[in-house]
Amino acid sequence: MTQAQPPNGLSSVLQAMWHDAKGDWDTAHNLAQSDKSAAGSWVHAYLHRVEGDIGNAGYWYGRAGKPACTSERAEEWDAIVKDLLAA
């Protein structure tokens, strides 16, 4: 990803994942936190997992209706993005 900004037309949760991929956790977290949907909660959970806050991640996985993820973070990132793009 060489773009300085996410592509136009992305949902807030896809923007959050884009910022995470660029290493901008704070912006990603702010975007996910502002999205009150199940998808926002799922991305929020993932981001707290990235942060290392497993307890907080568990709370957000529950809010998203998803089991806590135990796969590699890169695999979870791919799964989330694929799901969000298919929605």
Image: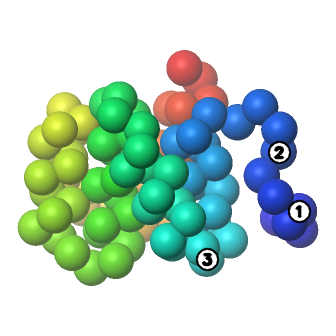
Please say if the residues under marks 2 and 1 sit with CB atoms less than 8 Å apart.
yes
**Which element type, helix, strand or loop, lies under badge 1?**
loop
Residue 3 shown left or right of residue 71 in the figure: right
Residue at 34 percent of width and 34 percent of height: 36
Q: Residue at x 10, y 67 (%)?
A: 55
Can you give x and y, in whole percent of width and height, for residue 42 in the image?
A: 33, 44
Q: Can you say whether 23 is above or below 16 in the image? A: below
Q: Please, what secondary structure does the residue beneath circle 2 have?
A: loop
In percent of width and height, residue 1 lies at: 82, 64
Q: In the rendered structure, which amino acid carries the disc numbered 3?
A: Gly
In the shown orientation, is residue 51 left or right of residue 86?
left
Measured in 3D between alpha carbons, the distance from the residue under mark 3 to the one under mark 1, in whole angstroms, is 13 Å
The residue that mark 3 highlights is: 23
- The residue that mark 2 highlights is 7
Tag 3 secondary structure: loop
Disc assigned to residue 67: none
Task: Give the mark, 3 or 1, whose residue is nearer the N terminus.
Answer: 1
Q: Quadrant of the C terminus?
A: top right
Q: Residue furthest top?
A: 87
- Mark on residue 3? 1
| Viewer can see residue 79 | no
